[in-house]
Image: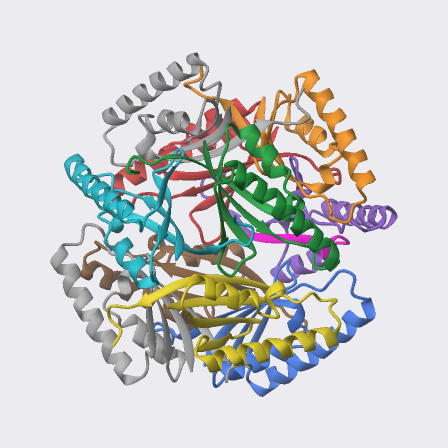
Chain colours: B orange, C green, D cyan, E yellow, G blue, H purple, I brown, J red
Amino acid sequence: MLFMVQMTVNLPQDMPAGTAAEIKAREKEYSQALQRSGKWPHIWRVVGEYKNVSIFDVGSNEELHELLSGLPLFPYMDISVTPLCRHPSAI
Amino acid sequence: MLFMVQMTVNLPQDMPAGTAAEIKAREKEYSQALQRSGKWPHIWRVVGEYKNVSIFDVGSNEELHELLSGLPLFPYMDISVTPLCRHPSAI
Amino acid sequence: MLFMVQMTVNLPQDMPAGTAAEIKAREKEYSQALQRSGKWPHIWRVVGEYKNVSIFDVGSNEELHELLSGLPLFPYMDISVTPLCRHPSAI
Amino acid sequence: MLFMVQMTVNLPQDMPAGTAAEIKAREKEYSQALQRSGKWPHIWRVVGEYKNVSIFDVGSNEELHELLSGLPLFPYMDISVTPLCRHPSAI
Amino acid sequence: MLFMVQMTVNLPQDMPAGTAAEIKAREKEYSQALQRSGKWPHIWRVVGEYKNVSIFDVGSNEELHELLSGLPLFPYMDISVTPLCRHPSAI
Amino acid sequence: MLFMVQMTVNLPQDMPAGTAAEIKAREKEYSQALQRSGKWPHIWRVVGEYKNVSIFDVGSNEELHELLSGLPLFPYMDISVTPLCRHPSAI
Amino acid sequence: MLFMVQMTVNLPQDMPAGTAAEIKAREKEYSQALQRSGKWPHIWRVVGEYKNVSIFDVGSNEELHELLSGLPLFPYMDISVTPLCRHPSAI
Amino acid sequence: MLFMVQMTVNLPQDMPAGTAAEIKAREKEYSQALQRSGKWPHIWRVVGEYKNVSIFDVGSNEELHELLSGLPLFPYMDISVTPLCRHPSAI
Amino acid sequence: MLFMVQMTVNLPQDMPAGTAAEIKAREKEYSQALQRSGKWPHIWRVVGEYKNVSIFDVGSNEELHELLSGLPLFPYMDISVTPLCRHPSAI
Amino acid sequence: MLFMVQMTVNLPQDMPAGTAAEIKAREKEYSQALQRSGKWPHIWRVVGEYKNVSIFDVGSNEELHELLSGLPLFPYMDISVTPLCRHPSAI
């Protein structure tokens, strides 16, 4: 079951560089594990912004919320979720 | 080069059913030809709306505009285009 | 799997009264059949507006889109869909 | 008398973890007492957000304001209230 | 129980003048009957707009919806409803 | 001459409790003096928000600005002002 | 007493040219009479739009509404009104 | 003196094809004459939309308004104007 | 050449009172010098807000930017600029 | 390949003047190097705002993102990107 998820990152400008680097490293590891599992099949950077457009493929709303709220950057992100389904013209 | 394209369809409510069906048939054929060519790798329906989220893979802005403005439903759609690029966490 | 669905109805002001009545009668029948099936457990009127707030309980995004796009009033409604899940404080 | 209430939580990012945990514990207790009383019949988490959609069943506007302004998280929330009533198609 | 109701009127520009006059006459009569009953204690015109700000005093959400949806101009109005209660500084 | 004034309070979350209490006490006193004078005939709390809807009855724009900018909470409020006049259907 | 009034004109695209010309001629005459009377001291065109920014100098909200609702183009305009007063830095 | 002008075209969907073609031909001729004169140094199509971003170089606000309001498509366009000046980092 | 300029002031709430007073004094002096020169012919306070509506009369966009960016309160203001020209109905 | 990029700068008000000056000096140098290379052919200041409108001419979305995210002011800017292409009326 597919969802488009748009995430915008807003790190506090007074966060120490080391803290930010550590969170981003954990975020990358977390994201790549989900990508490898097939639950996060697409992630793209929006040009010029600290923002991504992602596609998630999960079994339920609950699973999606669990994955998103576990993101190390979750407390610093604005997230919007759009449920998707098969388009009648898709081949 | 990737772009997210969001298309919302607004057919006039007084368009004859036959005309609408004919335009939609041409739209489907046009879309599927581009999907097969690899230029329109993803198209999803937004749940509950007459709207899609698509990913285009084109060589230039010009090519993207040519493809979009050639859509049979183009005169009846609101379209927004978001340039994408590789995310540093993508595997 | 739960979704909040908000539907605002915009009937064309020049639609003949008989046509409107016929569509609304079919909408009511369609809605009540889904309510009885358990897939549409809640529907409330928003005070002062031709709008409802509903809760759907479906097995997938695809099923929700199929149910919503089958609404007799679908061509005349603005619909927004919000995926829900269990709240950690819910009893 | 039913109201849809949407609550978005914005905890200050510099709030000590202990303080946040204590407020959330009180919030949970407060919410569950109201759920048990029948005044807060539904609470759902919005997927991907620190936000809930709730239904309140109260005797008056005054009572609703008293319940909401007593929430331990009230100073940290954006709240919107939508009055609801019975839908003519509800079974 | 008090509610602020804001009503903006959008009459179709091709409505015959006689029809418009007849609807407005019925609206005035309907409004004045409710004002006399005490259920619609205040109605003010917003300067420069075809819009009013009103205060309703009703027993329930249901009663408010019944009153508003019975307005002769209801099909031609955008309405927003804001639940009010006593202010702690009110004398 | 009537104006609707909507005031939303945003106290800084790090304001000491004593300071906040002192400002609110002065605000209440200031508001009640104006209510008694007849210049502030209505003040209602918006349910679920730290916001009020008020009606002012003043002799001029200048007088209204003087009254509003003298509010002890003025530096912490978003204020919007809507000029009102008699509605032709008012009894 | 000063007010900024912003008026945007939306003539229906199917209005006959003769009708439009006649309304505009009456609008011009009406506006110029008010300008000469001192009640409409400023009117400027917004560059690139069918819109004006105006300053009115009137004795009351009622008088302003009477002047604005009497504009021959009133049924075709979006109007917003902003109450002004003397600025403390004005010379 | 430079201005960014953004123009969005909204032709009525029931405009006869011949009328639309004739207006567009005049628009093109009008635009190209201004481009050759140096007053309209840049015009770009926004990808996926019936919209352009343009730069005008004119002697005054009045001249810009005269040029824009003379566009054959002016009655069918939404136009926004942004005054520009030299950037301190421009080479 | 005329421009409407709308300025909203947002002083940081932790700015020392003495600093604020000093900046406002310089702002007043700066504004009054420009008013006397004829370049800032009108400045009005928006009722109930820390905001002004002004008219500037300058020779070029560059001059306007130089005047505005030199305002002592410039770092603390949201500014929007609207180019104006003579209205065809102005007397 | 052309893109319009709009950048709004929001420096924290508590940033030391020396830090701000140093970042701006690096920003200017960075911008001018790109202007000289032909990749940033236009940069204009928006009158009255700490904002620019720019045109970039790059080979790909990736290149544009790399250039923008390398701006010394990038952490302090809101950026929006609009893909452009040749206008059919351009000479």
- Closer-to-camera residue (J75/D53): D53
Q: Residue I10 falls in which quadrant of the image?
A: bottom left
Q: Is residue I51 left or right of residue H61?
A: left
Viewer can see residue H55: no
Q: Residue at x 55, y 47 (%)?
A: C7
Q: In the shown orientation, is residue D58 left or right of residue B82?
A: left
Q: Is residue B61 visible?
A: yes
User: Looking at the rendering, in which quadrant would you find the C terminus of chain G?
Assistant: bottom left
Q: Nearer the viewer, residue H15 or B42?
A: B42
Image quarter (top left, top right, bottom left or bottom right) of the N terminus of chain G:
bottom left
Does the magenta portion include J12? no
Q: Which residues are magenta?
A: H71-82
Name the one closer to the observer, E15 or J11.
E15
Above or below: residue D46 compared with residue G39? above
Q: Check residue H77 for magenta coloring.
A: yes
- Vertical placement of J79 versus B44: above or below? below
Residue G18 in the image: x percent, y percent? 82, 71
